[in-house]
Each structure stands twice: as C-alpha cells, then as structure tokens.
Amino acid sequence: MYIAMGGERADKLEKRERALLDDRIRLIVGTVGRIDETARIVHLVDGTAIPYNYLVLATGARILPESIEHFATEAHHFYTADVALQLRRALDAFKGGKIVVGIASMP
C-alpha cells in the first residue's frame, strides 16, 4: 500500500525476518515432521527437536488474487511490490472520472 499510495520504494519496506523479532527470540526455520504432544516436542524433518511449554500453530494466509476471474486484467491491487507500482502508475496517469475502491475479504 505504501508503494501505491505513499511513494515508497520496495527496498525501503523489506526487512529480514530476524530484524522484526526481539533479540530474546530464537528464530528456527524448518519443516515440521511431527508433534509429540505428550512430551511437548516439535520434531523437524532435519532431526531437530524443539521442546515447548506452549505451542501456537499459526498457519498464516496466502493472497491469491489470481483465483478471482478477470482480477489480473480488470483490477489493480497492491499485494506485491510490482503490482503496487503498476497501480501507482495507473493513478498517476488518471485524468479524471470515477474510481471504485472495493474493500472485501482477502482474495
């Protein structure tokens, strides 16, 4: 949104995951093989075992504008830096008329 509306550049908005976390947090990236609820251990496929006191499963969300028919050719959005820049250019080229802003759930 900042690229499309605020004139920011993508490289100023991107940060490494580690930079977003408090120094006390240990970031481990891996693929879970299994969870032993009784022993409270998450086992990664690479053999790493991570004990836990509390386990929160946050599956996240994927943005799929391509799943909406004609979305790519008939709408603008700002879900990636490239298309946000296209939206910025379209707004700069706009000479007048009506713009519809549709706010819906995530596509």
Image (tube, helix red, strand yellow):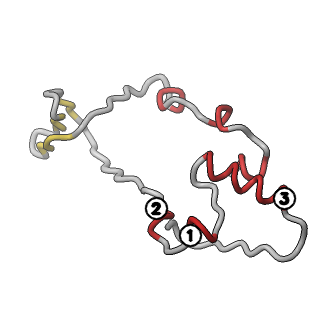
Tag 1's secondary structure?
helix
Against 98, residue 44 (above or below) is: above
Mark 1: few, some, or many residues within 10 Å (few <14, many ≥20)?
few
Residue drawn at (90%, 71%) of the image: 96
- Helix, strand or loop for disc 3: helix
Residue pushed farthest front? 73
| Of pointers 1 and 2, the one earlier in the residue sequence | 2
Residue 89 at x, y percent in the picture: 77, 53
Q: CA distance from mark 3 to mark 1?
A: 20 Å
**Tag 1: amino acid:** Phe
Sequence-wise, the earlier of marks 3 and 2 is 2
Q: Identify the disc placed on residue 64.
A: 2
Estimate how packed mark 2 is, as few (under 14), some (14 to 19) or many (20 or more) residues with alpha carbons within 10 Å: few
* Residue kind at label 2, given as amino acid type: Leu
Tell which tag, 1 or 2, sits nearer the viewer. Answer: 1
Amino acid of disc 3: Ala
x, y percentage for residue 91? 80, 59
Work out which residue is located at the far top of the displayed protein and give it. Answer: 23
Label 1 belongs to which residue?
71
The residue closer to the viewer here, 43 or 14, is 14
Residue at 20%, 40% (x, y): give it: 32
What residue sits right under mark 3 in the picture?
93
